[in-house]
Image (tube, helix red, strand yellow):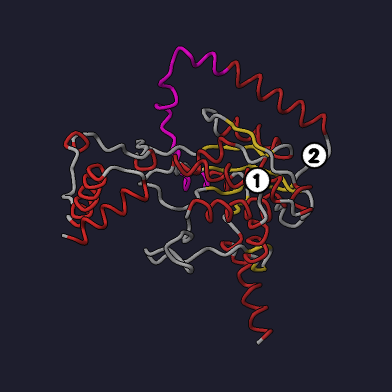
Amino acid sequence: RALTIKTMATLASSHFLSPAVAASSFHRRHLCQRCRKRKRAPTTNKKSSNRPIPIPLSALSIEEEKQDVSHFINLKNGIEALPVLREHFPHKHINFMRMQSTLCERGDMEKIMLEVDANLLLKLATDRPCVIYDYGSRSEETGLPRSFWYGLESMMYFLRHEWGFDGYGEEDNIGCTDGRRRREVVLRGKKCTKEIERKRTFFSKSLKKKIRYYRQFIPETHSRELKVIGAYKLTAHDGDREYYKETLNEHLRIQSSTSRSRSHDDDRNDDNGDDDSLEATIEKLEQLGFKIFHGGDREQEWLDMIKSSSSSST
Protein backbone atom coordinates (compact mmCIF):
# COMPACT_ATOMS: atom_id res chain seq x y z
CA ARG A 1 0.00 0.00 0.00
CA ALA A 2 2.90 2.27 0.76
CA LEU A 3 4.28 1.53 -2.71
CA THR A 4 0.91 2.33 -4.25
CA ILE A 5 0.68 5.64 -2.46
CA LYS A 6 4.23 6.47 -3.52
CA THR A 7 3.45 5.65 -7.13
CA MET A 8 0.37 7.88 -7.12
CA ALA A 9 2.41 10.67 -5.63
CA THR A 10 4.97 10.30 -8.36
CA LEU A 11 2.27 10.46 -11.02
CA ALA A 12 0.81 13.54 -9.45
CA SER A 13 4.15 15.33 -9.33
CA SER A 14 5.20 14.37 -12.87
CA HIS A 15 1.89 15.35 -14.50
CA PHE A 16 0.97 18.19 -12.17
CA LEU A 17 -2.14 16.35 -10.97
CA SER A 18 -3.75 16.34 -7.56
CA PRO A 19 -3.45 13.13 -5.52
CA ALA A 20 -7.20 12.47 -5.87
CA VAL A 21 -7.11 12.74 -9.65
CA ALA A 22 -3.97 10.61 -9.81
CA ALA A 23 -5.62 7.89 -7.69
CA SER A 24 -8.71 7.75 -9.89
CA SER A 25 -6.53 7.60 -13.01
CA PHE A 26 -4.42 4.82 -11.49
CA HIS A 27 -7.46 2.67 -10.64
CA ARG A 28 -9.01 3.17 -14.10
CA ARG A 29 -5.76 2.02 -15.70
CA HIS A 30 -5.61 -1.18 -13.68
CA LEU A 31 -9.30 -1.81 -14.30
CA CYS A 32 -8.82 -1.54 -18.11
CA GLN A 33 -5.90 -3.95 -17.96
CA ARG A 34 -8.07 -6.51 -16.17
CA CYS A 35 -10.82 -6.06 -18.76
CA ARG A 36 -8.43 -6.63 -21.65
CA LYS A 37 -7.58 -10.10 -20.31
CA ARG A 38 -11.19 -11.19 -20.66
CA LYS A 39 -12.15 -12.48 -24.10
CA ARG A 40 -15.29 -10.93 -25.42
CA ALA A 41 -17.88 -13.30 -26.80
CA PRO A 42 -18.38 -12.97 -30.55
CA THR A 43 -21.36 -10.86 -31.47
CA THR A 44 -23.75 -11.91 -34.17
CA ASN A 45 -25.87 -9.61 -36.23
CA LYS A 46 -29.31 -11.10 -36.43
CA LYS A 47 -30.34 -8.79 -39.22
CA SER A 48 -27.48 -9.83 -41.50
CA SER A 49 -28.49 -13.50 -41.37
CA ASN A 50 -31.80 -12.67 -43.01
CA ARG A 51 -30.24 -10.83 -45.92
CA PRO A 52 -30.39 -12.67 -49.26
CA ILE A 53 -27.03 -13.80 -50.62
CA PRO A 54 -26.42 -12.26 -54.06
CA ILE A 55 -25.98 -14.80 -56.86
CA PRO A 56 -23.09 -14.05 -59.24
CA LEU A 57 -23.98 -13.64 -62.87
CA SER A 58 -21.62 -16.45 -63.86
CA ALA A 59 -23.77 -18.90 -61.88
CA LEU A 60 -26.82 -18.13 -63.98
CA SER A 61 -27.17 -20.51 -66.91
CA ILE A 62 -28.69 -19.40 -70.17
CA GLU A 63 -31.09 -22.10 -71.16
CA GLU A 64 -32.30 -22.57 -74.66
CA GLU A 65 -34.22 -25.28 -76.45
CA LYS A 66 -31.69 -25.43 -79.27
CA GLN A 67 -28.39 -23.76 -79.96
CA ASP A 68 -28.51 -22.21 -83.39
CA VAL A 69 -25.26 -21.74 -85.27
CA SER A 70 -24.12 -18.14 -85.68
CA HIS A 71 -22.52 -17.28 -89.02
CA PHE A 72 -19.68 -14.74 -89.28
CA ILE A 73 -18.20 -13.31 -92.49
CA ASN A 74 -14.54 -12.34 -92.21
CA LEU A 75 -13.99 -9.19 -94.25
CA LYS A 76 -13.31 -8.91 -96.90
CA ASN A 77 -12.70 -12.15 -98.87
CA GLY A 78 -15.36 -13.88 -96.81
CA ILE A 79 -17.97 -11.81 -98.65
CA GLU A 80 -17.76 -14.42 -101.43
CA ALA A 81 -19.75 -16.77 -99.18
CA LEU A 82 -22.78 -14.46 -98.97
CA PRO A 83 -24.58 -15.77 -102.10
CA VAL A 84 -24.13 -19.35 -100.88
CA LEU A 85 -25.39 -18.55 -97.39
CA ARG A 86 -28.35 -16.61 -98.73
CA GLU A 87 -29.39 -19.59 -100.85
CA HIS A 88 -28.77 -22.46 -98.44
CA PHE A 89 -29.23 -20.67 -95.08
CA PRO A 90 -31.96 -18.16 -96.01
CA HIS A 91 -33.33 -17.70 -92.49
CA LYS A 92 -29.99 -17.01 -90.82
CA HIS A 93 -28.74 -13.62 -89.74
CA ILE A 94 -25.23 -12.98 -91.01
CA ASN A 95 -22.68 -11.30 -88.75
CA PHE A 96 -19.49 -9.57 -89.84
CA MET A 97 -16.01 -9.44 -88.34
CA ARG A 98 -12.49 -8.61 -89.44
CA MET A 99 -9.30 -10.54 -88.80
CA GLN A 100 -6.66 -9.05 -91.05
CA SER A 101 -4.26 -11.40 -92.79
CA THR A 102 -1.66 -8.60 -92.93
CA LEU A 103 -1.63 -8.46 -89.11
CA CYS A 104 -1.29 -12.24 -89.06
CA GLU A 105 1.73 -12.00 -91.36
CA ARG A 106 3.36 -9.57 -88.93
CA GLY A 107 2.32 -11.68 -85.94
CA ASP A 108 0.73 -8.65 -84.29
CA MET A 109 -1.67 -10.52 -82.02
CA GLU A 110 -2.26 -7.43 -79.86
CA LYS A 111 -4.03 -5.62 -82.69
CA ILE A 112 -5.73 -8.79 -83.91
CA MET A 113 -7.34 -9.41 -80.53
CA LEU A 114 -8.30 -5.76 -80.14
CA GLU A 115 -10.27 -6.03 -83.40
CA VAL A 116 -12.10 -9.25 -82.48
CA ASP A 117 -15.83 -8.67 -82.73
CA ALA A 118 -17.68 -8.30 -79.42
CA ASN A 119 -20.61 -10.31 -80.78
CA LEU A 120 -18.31 -13.25 -81.52
CA LEU A 121 -16.77 -13.15 -78.04
CA LEU A 122 -20.20 -13.04 -76.42
CA LYS A 123 -21.44 -15.99 -78.49
CA LEU A 124 -18.43 -18.11 -77.51
CA ALA A 125 -18.65 -17.10 -73.86
CA THR A 126 -22.30 -18.22 -73.73
CA ASP A 127 -21.50 -21.58 -75.40
CA ARG A 128 -23.03 -20.77 -78.80
CA PRO A 129 -21.58 -22.55 -81.87
CA CYS A 130 -20.08 -20.23 -84.49
CA VAL A 131 -18.89 -20.64 -88.07
CA ILE A 132 -16.46 -18.12 -89.60
CA TYR A 133 -16.22 -17.86 -93.40
CA ASP A 134 -13.16 -16.77 -95.31
CA TYR A 135 -11.56 -17.37 -98.72
CA GLY A 136 -7.82 -17.92 -98.97
CA SER A 137 -5.52 -16.61 -101.70
CA ARG A 138 -2.01 -17.77 -100.77
CA SER A 139 -2.35 -21.56 -100.59
CA GLU A 140 -3.62 -22.59 -104.02
CA GLU A 141 -3.77 -26.27 -103.05
CA THR A 142 -6.05 -25.98 -100.01
CA GLY A 143 -7.18 -22.35 -99.92
CA LEU A 144 -6.68 -22.30 -96.15
CA PRO A 145 -6.45 -18.59 -95.22
CA ARG A 146 -3.84 -17.26 -92.82
CA SER A 147 -6.63 -15.75 -90.76
CA PHE A 148 -7.59 -19.31 -89.79
CA TRP A 149 -4.39 -21.30 -89.37
CA TYR A 150 -2.66 -18.45 -87.54
CA GLY A 151 -5.25 -15.86 -86.45
CA LEU A 152 -8.13 -18.10 -85.41
CA GLU A 153 -5.80 -20.70 -83.91
CA SER A 154 -4.05 -18.08 -81.77
CA MET A 155 -7.31 -16.40 -80.79
CA MET A 156 -8.71 -19.68 -79.52
CA TYR A 157 -5.60 -20.18 -77.38
CA PHE A 158 -5.92 -16.74 -75.78
CA LEU A 159 -9.59 -17.28 -74.99
CA ARG A 160 -8.96 -20.77 -73.60
CA HIS A 161 -6.25 -19.42 -71.34
CA GLU A 162 -8.18 -16.42 -70.03
CA TRP A 163 -11.53 -18.23 -69.72
CA GLY A 164 -10.22 -21.59 -68.48
CA PHE A 165 -11.52 -23.68 -71.41
CA ASP A 166 -10.18 -26.83 -73.14
CA GLY A 167 -8.02 -27.92 -70.23
CA TYR A 168 -6.78 -24.46 -69.23
CA GLY A 169 -7.41 -23.03 -65.82
CA GLU A 170 -5.87 -22.29 -62.44
CA GLU A 171 -6.47 -25.76 -61.01
CA ASP A 172 -3.61 -27.59 -62.66
CA ASN A 173 -0.51 -26.74 -64.66
CA ILE A 174 -1.17 -29.61 -67.05
CA GLY A 175 -4.91 -29.77 -67.38
CA CYS A 176 -8.22 -29.42 -65.60
CA THR A 177 -9.22 -31.52 -62.64
CA ASP A 178 -11.71 -33.44 -64.78
CA GLY A 179 -8.87 -35.06 -66.73
CA ARG A 180 -8.92 -33.00 -69.92
CA ARG A 181 -5.54 -32.16 -71.37
CA ARG A 182 -4.60 -28.72 -72.56
CA ARG A 183 -4.89 -28.24 -76.30
CA GLU A 184 -1.68 -27.37 -78.10
CA VAL A 185 -1.26 -24.50 -80.56
CA VAL A 186 -0.31 -26.11 -83.87
CA LEU A 187 0.62 -23.86 -86.78
CA ARG A 188 1.06 -25.76 -90.03
CA GLY A 189 2.36 -28.89 -88.40
CA LYS A 190 4.51 -27.21 -85.72
CA LYS A 191 3.78 -26.91 -82.02
CA CYS A 192 3.96 -23.20 -81.23
CA THR A 193 2.30 -23.00 -77.82
CA LYS A 194 5.36 -21.43 -76.16
CA GLU A 195 5.69 -18.82 -78.90
CA ILE A 196 2.02 -17.83 -78.71
CA GLU A 197 2.12 -17.81 -74.90
CA ARG A 198 5.07 -15.43 -75.06
CA LYS A 199 2.95 -13.05 -77.12
CA ARG A 200 0.15 -13.29 -74.56
CA THR A 201 2.47 -12.26 -71.71
CA PHE A 202 3.15 -8.97 -73.51
CA PHE A 203 -0.52 -8.09 -73.95
CA SER A 204 -1.50 -4.67 -72.65
CA LYS A 205 -3.71 -4.35 -69.57
CA SER A 206 -6.53 -2.95 -71.68
CA LEU A 207 -6.53 -6.01 -73.97
CA LYS A 208 -6.46 -8.47 -71.06
CA LYS A 209 -9.31 -6.53 -69.47
CA LYS A 210 -11.30 -6.76 -72.71
CA ILE A 211 -10.89 -10.55 -72.94
CA ARG A 212 -11.62 -11.16 -69.26
CA TYR A 213 -14.71 -8.93 -69.38
CA TYR A 214 -16.74 -11.71 -71.04
CA ARG A 215 -16.03 -14.22 -68.27
CA GLN A 216 -18.91 -12.77 -66.26
CA PHE A 217 -21.36 -14.09 -68.89
CA ILE A 218 -20.07 -17.69 -68.88
CA PRO A 219 -22.86 -19.96 -67.53
CA GLU A 220 -22.21 -22.84 -65.16
CA THR A 221 -23.56 -25.22 -67.80
CA HIS A 222 -20.90 -24.22 -70.33
CA SER A 223 -19.21 -27.13 -72.10
CA ARG A 224 -15.81 -25.50 -71.36
CA GLU A 225 -14.94 -25.74 -75.05
CA LEU A 226 -14.87 -23.15 -77.82
CA LYS A 227 -17.47 -24.13 -80.39
CA VAL A 228 -16.01 -22.29 -83.36
CA ILE A 229 -14.87 -23.58 -86.74
CA GLY A 230 -13.69 -22.01 -89.96
CA ALA A 231 -15.28 -22.70 -93.36
CA TYR A 232 -13.09 -21.78 -96.31
CA LYS A 233 -12.48 -22.07 -100.03
CA LEU A 234 -9.94 -20.78 -102.51
CA THR A 235 -10.82 -17.24 -103.55
CA ALA A 236 -11.73 -16.34 -107.13
CA HIS A 237 -12.00 -12.55 -106.63
CA ASP A 238 -8.92 -11.62 -104.60
CA GLY A 239 -8.28 -7.88 -104.95
CA ASP A 240 -11.54 -7.22 -106.83
CA ARG A 241 -12.92 -4.41 -104.67
CA GLU A 242 -15.82 -3.72 -107.01
CA TYR A 243 -17.04 -7.31 -106.72
CA TYR A 244 -16.92 -7.26 -102.91
CA LYS A 245 -18.70 -3.90 -102.76
CA GLU A 246 -21.52 -4.98 -105.07
CA THR A 247 -21.93 -8.40 -103.43
CA LEU A 248 -22.09 -6.93 -99.93
CA ASN A 249 -24.56 -4.18 -100.78
CA GLU A 250 -26.75 -6.60 -102.70
CA HIS A 251 -26.86 -8.91 -99.70
CA LEU A 252 -27.76 -6.07 -97.33
CA ARG A 253 -30.47 -4.87 -99.67
CA ILE A 254 -32.02 -8.34 -99.98
CA GLN A 255 -31.70 -8.95 -96.25
CA SER A 256 -33.47 -5.69 -95.46
CA SER A 257 -36.38 -6.42 -97.78
CA THR A 258 -36.67 -9.99 -96.54
CA SER A 259 -36.73 -8.92 -92.89
CA ARG A 260 -39.59 -6.50 -93.62
CA SER A 261 -41.61 -9.25 -95.31
CA ARG A 262 -41.08 -11.53 -92.31
CA SER A 263 -42.21 -8.97 -89.79
CA HIS A 264 -45.82 -10.22 -90.11
CA ASP A 265 -44.79 -13.82 -89.49
CA ASP A 266 -42.37 -14.10 -86.56
CA ASP A 267 -42.69 -17.87 -86.36
CA ARG A 268 -41.39 -18.55 -89.85
CA ASN A 269 -37.89 -19.39 -88.66
CA ASP A 270 -39.20 -21.83 -86.09
CA ASP A 271 -41.32 -23.74 -88.60
CA ASN A 272 -38.72 -24.24 -91.33
CA GLY A 273 -37.83 -27.71 -89.99
CA ASP A 274 -34.08 -27.30 -90.60
CA ASP A 275 -31.51 -28.86 -88.31
CA ASP A 276 -29.50 -25.94 -86.95
CA SER A 277 -26.95 -27.96 -84.99
CA LEU A 278 -23.25 -27.47 -85.61
CA GLU A 279 -22.84 -31.03 -86.89
CA ALA A 280 -25.63 -30.61 -89.44
CA THR A 281 -24.20 -27.26 -90.51
CA ILE A 282 -20.75 -28.79 -91.06
CA GLU A 283 -22.22 -31.61 -93.13
CA LYS A 284 -24.15 -29.14 -95.25
CA LEU A 285 -21.12 -26.91 -95.79
CA GLU A 286 -18.97 -29.85 -96.87
CA GLN A 287 -21.61 -30.75 -99.42
CA LEU A 288 -21.36 -27.20 -100.73
CA GLY A 289 -17.62 -27.59 -101.25
CA PHE A 290 -16.36 -25.84 -98.10
CA LYS A 291 -13.42 -27.21 -96.16
CA ILE A 292 -13.62 -27.09 -92.38
CA PHE A 293 -10.90 -25.84 -90.05
CA HIS A 294 -11.37 -27.27 -86.54
CA GLY A 295 -8.01 -26.14 -85.17
CA GLY A 296 -4.34 -26.83 -85.72
CA ASP A 297 -4.33 -29.79 -83.35
CA ARG A 298 -7.32 -31.29 -85.18
CA GLU A 299 -5.71 -31.35 -88.64
CA GLN A 300 -4.55 -34.92 -89.19
CA GLU A 301 -2.05 -33.92 -91.88
CA TRP A 302 -0.35 -31.49 -89.52
CA LEU A 303 -0.35 -34.02 -86.68
CA ASP A 304 1.39 -36.50 -88.98
CA MET A 305 4.00 -33.83 -89.70
CA ILE A 306 4.67 -33.46 -85.97
CA LYS A 307 5.02 -37.23 -85.53
CA SER A 308 7.38 -37.54 -88.49
CA SER A 309 9.58 -34.66 -87.30
CA SER A 310 9.76 -36.05 -83.76
CA SER A 311 10.63 -39.55 -84.99
CA SER A 312 13.36 -38.25 -87.33
CA SER A 313 14.95 -36.19 -84.57
CA THR A 314 15.23 -39.26 -82.37
Q: Secondary structure at mark 1?
A: helix
Q: Quadrant location of residue 288? A: top right
- Residue at mark 2 to residue at mark 1: CA–CA distance: 27 Å
Position of the C terminus, as image quadrant, is bottom right
Which stretch appears magenta?
Answer: 258-283
Q: Name the residue at 52% across, 41% down.
A: 213
Q: Which mark is residue 237?
A: 2
Count neighbours of disc 2 (C-alpha within 10 A) and say few if under 14, some if 14 to 19, many if 20 or more. Answer: some
Decide which of tag 2 and tag 1 comes sooner along the chain: 1
Kind of residue indicated by mark 1: Met
- Residue 227 is situated, as x and y percent measured from the top left of the image, at 50, 48
Task: Please tell me whether residue 143 belongs to the stretch shown in magenta.
Answer: no
- Residue 256 is situated, as x and y percent measured from the top left of the image, at 60, 18
Which one is nearer the viewer's eye here, 304 or 37? 37
- Tell me if residue 189 comes above or below residue 97 in the rendering: below
User: Left or right: where does residue 232 sit relative to residue 216?
Assistant: right
User: Left or right: where does residue 60 sit relative to residue 280?
Assistant: left
**Residue that badge 1 annotates:** 113
Q: Quadrant location of residue 81? A: top right
